[in-house]
Amino acid sequence: NGVFMQETLKVAQNDDIIMMREVAHKERTHARKMRAFFRYADHSKDHVITREEWERVVSGHHAQHWFSAQGLKVKDAEAVFRLLDEDRSNGISMDELIAGVAALQGPAKSLDLAVLTENHGRLHRAMASVTKRLESIERSLASARLRSPSKEREQRGPIQSEEADSWAL
């Protein structure tokens, strides 16, 4: 019975090693495919895929089918470009392409949705706080204007006051 358990643990450990090797192999294969696509799409050979280069290549059915085979549906080329252009440089580097496509592949995971929900909640709370502050500032300004309309005329001076403007001809 002990020998059976020992053998079962060895098989399970080997399964883990095999799974880790498969993951590493998939990552290398993905990187190789993305580097090949990058070289194909970078027409200017400046080591950046510009928005124009991206749209030219991805608008074709061949590229859309190729990306679908990689697990990424590119229905909105502009939106995918923005998601891949992580540094907002208006260009996609090779590293951005490799990492970005890997992150966007496949269906959304529970963790992805949880992070998105948490970020949305944080932004919503921040916007509510900013809105409250702006409303408070508006009320303070309105209150200050109501309390001292004559001081405003005094600050403008006697020549620039509304009464002086109405009597001057």
Image (cartoon, rainbow, N blue to C red):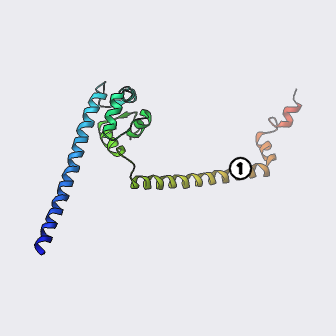
x 50%, y 52%: residue: 120
> Which quadrant would residue 71 be assigned to in this image?
top left
Disc 1 residue type (three-letter): Leu
Location of residue 147 with respect to 36 vertically, above or below: below
Q: Nearer the viewer, residue 167 or 131?
A: 131
Q: Is residue 13 left or right of residue 92?
A: left
Q: Give percent across and percent down for residue 79.
A: 44, 37
x 40%, y 49%: residue: 108
Location of residue 35 with respect to 10 vertically, above or below: above
Q: Is residue 98 left or right of residue 146?
A: left
Q: Which quarter of the figure is the C terminus placed in?
A: top right
Q: Give percent across and percent down for residue 29.
A: 22, 41
> Which quadrant would residue 152 be assigned to in this image?
top right
Q: Could you tell me how many numbered marks the image carries? A: 1
Q: Give percent across and percent down for residue 42.
A: 30, 28
Question: Which residue has dot 1 on it?
Answer: 141
x 34%, y 42%: residue: 100
Q: Is residue 15 left or right of residue 89?
A: left
**Callout 1 crowding tier (Cα within 10 Å): few <14, some 14–19, many ≥20:** few
Q: Nearer the viewer, residue 143 or 121?
A: 121
Q: Give percent across and percent down for residue 44.
A: 31, 24
Q: Which quarter of the figure is the N terminus placed in?
A: bottom left
Q: Is residue 71 left or right of residue 115?
A: left
Pick out the residue farthest to the bottom. Answer: 1
Pick out the residue farthest to the left. Answer: 3
> Which quadrant would residue 53 be assigned to in this image?
top left
Q: Secondary structure at mark 1?
A: helix
